[in-house]
Amino acid sequence: MTDAPPQAAVDRLNSIRQSIDNIDAALVHLLAERFKFTQSVGVLKAEAGMPPSDPEREKVQIRRLRALAVESRLDPDFTEKFLNFIVSEVIHHHERIAAGDEVVE
């Protein structure tokens, strides 16, 4: 049988985890807001006959966010992967909007 960890450590761990949970909730809400705007972009692009993706803007955003990551002491490679994941999902939505498959609220 192992000794139970000190209660102070358990309390601190729970406090830190609560902070992480709060940040996770904020991230979900921020992503939801971001996707509301990207849906509007998708509708605009579809109406104007513009392509779903904009590789030049994506390059600029990657450079900008990598620099922000460095300033924030966050791994810029991770940041780029995360952005690429989001952008690929946005492009997928834009393609569906252009095809008339995506319902925009």
Image (tube, rainbow, N blue to C red):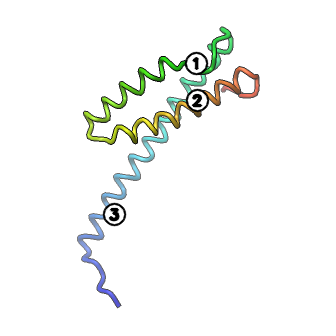
Q: Which residue is painted at 27% across and 37% down in the image?
A: 72
Q: Are marks 2 and 1 in contact (CB under 8 Å)?
A: yes
Q: Quadrant of the N terminus?
A: bottom left
Answer with the quarter of the image where residue 27 lies.
Answer: top left
Residue 102: percent from the left, percent from the top?
71, 28
Query: Which numbered circle lies on residue 90?
Result: 2
Query: Which numbered circle lies on residue 41?
Result: 1
Answer with the quarter of the image where residue 63 lies.
Answer: top left
Between residue 23 and residue 1, name the one nearer to us: 1
In this view, the residue farthest toward the top is: 48
- Residue 83 is left or right of residue 11, and the answer is right
Answer with the quarter of the image where residue 90 lies.
Answer: top right
Q: Nearer the viewer, mark 1 or mark 3?
A: 1
Q: Nearer the viewer, mark 3 or mark 2?
A: 2
In this view, the residue farthest toward the right is: 100
Q: Quadrant of the C terminus?
A: top right
Residue 45: percent from the left, percent from the top?
63, 14
Disc 2 element: helix
Q: Nearer the viewer, mark 2 or mark 1?
A: 2
- Residue 85 is left or right of residue 100, and the answer is left
Residue 34: percent from the left, percent from the top?
50, 29
Query: Which numbered circle lies on residue 14?
Result: 3
Disc 1 element: helix
Establish if 22 lies above or below 36.
below
Residue 73: percent from the left, percent from the top?
26, 40
- Residue 25 is left or right of residue 95, and the answer is left
Q: Which residue is painted at 63% across and 16% down in the image?
A: 51
Q: Which of the marked residues, 2 or 1, is nearer the chain's N terminus? A: 1
Q: Mark 1 to mark 3: distance in Å?
A: 40 Å
What's the residue type where badge 2 is placed?
Val
Query: Which numbered circle lies on residue 3?
Result: none
